[in-house]
Amino acid sequence: MKQVAITGPKTAALLDVPDPSPKENWVVVRITVAPMCTEYKMWVGGHKADFLGHEAVGEVVGVAQPGRVKIGDRVVVQPSYPCGACTLCIAGDYIHCEHGVDLAAFTGSPYGTATYAEYLIKPDWLCSPIPDDFTDDQAGLALCALGPSFGAFETAGVTAFHTVLICGLGPVGLGGVVNAVYRGARVIGVESNAYRAALALRLGAEAVLDPGLEDLGARIRDLTDGRGVDVGLDCSGSTAAHRVLIDAAARKGAVMFVGESNGDTIVHISPDMIRKGLRLVGSWHYNRSLYPRLLQVIRRSCAAGELVTHTFPLANVQEAFSTLAGQQTGKVLLRP
């Protein structure tokens, strides 16, 4: 099969690698849509890598035994390689599993984990069925486009009575706008990229503020009658954004963190946590039991379809990386 590799600075190529083979309850999926995420940063930096991607939609083409899916089924392939047996996996919070499976040890081959490829292998219980009325592109929204913010808003209990502040309006943050607006919440964004700020407004955000504003905190307070926001969502990974969200949160509010961060954020326990009564929560994905509810958002939201702005065939991955790096996009899809 063909599989994408980053071979040098701003250079990607297609490699010929062995096809994966089904084993026990692990099935082979022919990938039809591979949503792109932050892998373009590795392409920009020239970090060589052969196994790229963690999101996929496709068709089951290989099974080793009867199970939860069969050949011909269209599925959303959920991320990660959890054990499937621990309490977290059983409860649907498999994304936090501490006992991941070593694919190479299990199957005898390392190939099949990358989604920037033609095929992958996955346990059947992580292959979520796609309704007949969904296109593969629509199904692709059930991963990082809408999934992280959906899970965060479920935990925070976002409703139409809430004002939500979203910092970082890349594809995940834009998905947060869609999810919050679908729930009836009022949305304020913080983003310096003019293209993405404009897209967020089209998706339903009420206002988008530039993070460089000297009076950013005051502007947020003005928009909330001095009270602050009920829920904050960080999709930027910026420690400065973390403080904006904590400071902007109303008393008894919540700040949800979904953007990966390498920095250290200072949290003042007494003024930030005790006196304000804040909840600071890390959120990665959504509980597997919530998949049908996320499909409802995709099916009924007037804005969800606008999240995907570009699509490329796998052979044009070099152009796809370049386009993503330009940051004038919403969600970008590869089509193997």
Image (cartoon, helix red, strand yellow):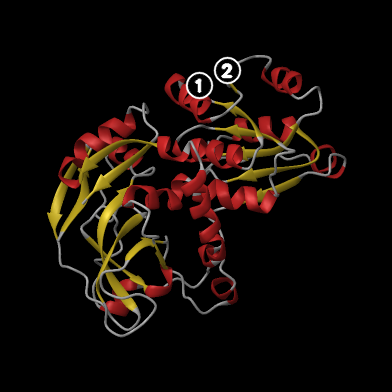
In this view, which residue lies farthest toward the top?
A: 214
- Asked whether, in this view, residue 276 is left or right of residue 2, the answer is right
Quadrant of the rendered image containing residue 115? bottom left
Find residue 10 and report its horizontal and vertical position in percent.
23, 35
On the image, numbered disc 2 is attached to which residue?
212
Question: Is 104 rendered above or below residue 250?
Answer: below
In this view, which residue lies farthest toward the front?
A: 133
Find residue 3 and report its horizontal and vertical position in percent.
19, 55
In the image, what residue occupies the spot 31% across and 68% down?
73
Q: For the residue labelled by badge 1, is the local secondary structure a helix, a strand or a loop?
A: loop
Find residue 123 and report its horizontal and vertical position in percent.
38, 73
Quadrant of the rendered image containing residue 72? bottom left
In the image, what residue occupies the spot 50% across and 40% down?
175
Counting residues from the start of the chain, the first of labels 1 and 2 encountered is: 1
- Asked whether, in this view, residue 245 is left or right of residue 134, the answer is right
Amino acid type at image mark 2 = Gly
In the image, which disc is placed on residue 54? Answer: none
Disc 1 crowd rating (10 Å Cα; few below 14, some 14-19, many 20+) is some
Find residue 162 and report its horizontal and vertical position in percent.
72, 37
In the image, which disc is placed on residue 192? Answer: 1
Quadrant of the image containing the N terminus: bottom left
Residue 275 in view: yes
Residue 235 in view: no
Amino acid type at image mark 1 = Ser
Cβ–Cβ under 8 Å for marks 1 and 2: yes
Q: CA distance from mark 1 to mark 2?
A: 8 Å
- Asked whether, in this view, residue 279 is left or right of residue 12, the answer is right
Question: Is 217 rendered above or below residue 247?
Answer: above
In the image, what residue occupies the spot 33% across and 27% down?
326
Mark 1 or 2, closer to the camera: 1
Query: Which is nearer the eye, 331 or 17?
Result: 331
